[in-house]
Every structure is written in structure tokens, then in C-alpha cells.
Amino acid sequence: MAHAYQTDQYEGMIAETITMRGHNGDVINAYVARPLGAGPFPGMVVIHHAPGWDEWYRECTRKFGAKVRAAGGAPDARVLGDLEGANTVLRSLPYVTRKIGVFGTCSGGRQAVLAGSRLKGFDAVIDCWGGRVVMSKEELTPNQPVAPIEYTKDLSAPVLGLFGNDDKAPTPEQVNQHEAELKKHSKSYEFHRYDGAGHGFFYYDRGAYRQEQAMDGWKKLFAFTDRTLR
């Protein structure tokens, strides 16, 4: 179980806010957590959802460390530039291995899928209920000019997808479309779909939370990272 606790487990950790270079060399803030010790450890870039960086994402970042909305969202080009900067920072750290993953929920899940196709420095992609991977022509904007599914042929990392069958963005039909495209291009992926769960079922501080499904999702997630990032 993802939240199982052992009294003798190692808990030493550093968690802090740093500055880093993002898109176009902009200085941006980032929250970093890592186990104490020489390492090296795999790395994970965590992408927050559209409402922004909140306490759930700080805890999520610490969970990975312990485990060794304006105008339709940020422009895809800026997001990719910032993620490339985060990847560069992780790869520069002496306690990080050469294995780096990218994780996101909601809009961050979409951006994780986009990063796995448009950037070549990630070794695993985790998409939690990422909406707008599949987009109609009417949904395209100058900030989001291409649907991430259109880049599937360029995907360079295995993908884990976690979805609720009651979700409306993405709908089960859109998840089916995404899966079909991954199969078409012979990409490495695994999708897990949960009955009785909708959008954001990991968020323990909201009504959308579904404990049983979330616990199984974290179990699937860490099994995936053990295979792809160790």
C-alpha cells in the first residue's frame, strides 16, 4: 500500500524551494525533495495541475523523494522549456542517476505526455487523468496548437496512464483513442482504469478522493517506476 508505514523505515530527507532556469532562461521557482545520503537515486519531475502548485503537490514531491488557470493554461512551448530546465537541473545533481521520469495530473498529465514526445530526456511518463491529450480542431489554440496525441509517433519513453471511468476529461472514449494510437505506433505503455472514480481521485483533500482506487493507483505507479527508473 502506498501509505503503509513502517516504524523502522528511513525518513531522512531534504525538501526545499530552489530557483532554476526555465523557458527562455527565465528564473522560476521549483520545489525539490530528496532522501539524505549519497545516492545516486532516480529523478522525477512533477507537473502540477492547472489551479497551480499547492500542498498536495508538495506532499506528492516528498512522496517521490521518500520513495526513491488563465487563458486555457500555459503555452505548450513555455511548459516544455520549463520541463527541459527541470530535467537539466536533476541531471546536474550528484545524487541523481541518469534515469528521470515526468509525472503529472490533470493538465499536468497532458503536459507529461507532451514532454515524453517532444523532449528526449525523459525515461518514463506518468499521466494521471490528463485531459486534452485528445483534442478537437475547435479546442486548439495558439497556446496549445497541436493535440499531444498527434505526437505519439515521437514518444520516446514508456507511459503509465491512470484514469477514472467516471471522468469527463478525459472521457473513457478519449482514453480509448489514446490507447489505440499508442498501439498503432507500437509504444510501450500500460493503462489502468478505475470504476467508481472520476477526475482527481488521488486528491485526498477533495470530494473526488477514492481511497481504494487511489491506493491501488499509487501501487501501480511505484511498480512502474521500479521497472523504468531503477
Image: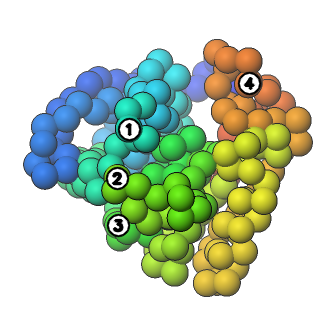
Residue 34 position within the rendered picture, expressed as x and y whole percent measured from the top left: 37, 34
Q: Who's the residue at 29% across and 23% down the image?
A: 16
- Evaluate if marks 1 and 3 touch, with contact meaning CB atoms under 8 Å apart: no
Answer with mark 4 or mark 2, whichever residue precedes in sequence. Answer: 2
**Circle 1 crowding by C-alpha within 10 Å: few under 14, some 14–19, many from 20:** few
Answer with mark 3 or mark 4, whichever residue precedes in sequence. Answer: 3
- Evaluate if marks 2 and 1 touch, with contact meaning CB atoms under 8 Å apart: yes
Answer with mark 2 or mark 1, whichever residue precedes in sequence. Answer: 1
Front label number (1 vs 4): 1
Q: Who's the residue at 20% across and 46% down the image?
A: 22
Answer with mark 2 or mark 3, whichever residue precedes in sequence. Answer: 3
Three-letter code for the amino acid on which mark 2 is drawn:
Asn
Q: Secondary structure at mark 3?
A: loop
Q: CA distance from mark 1 to mark 4?
A: 27 Å
Q: Which residue is mark 1?
A: 71
Three-letter code for the amino acid on which mark 3 is drawn:
Leu
Name the mark on residue 143: 2
Q: Which residue is mark 3?
A: 119
Q: Secondary structure at mark 2?
A: loop
Q: Please tell me in which quadrant of the rendered image residue 144 appears.
A: bottom left
Answer with mark 1 or mark 4, whichever residue precedes in sequence. Answer: 1
Residue 31 in view of the camera:
yes
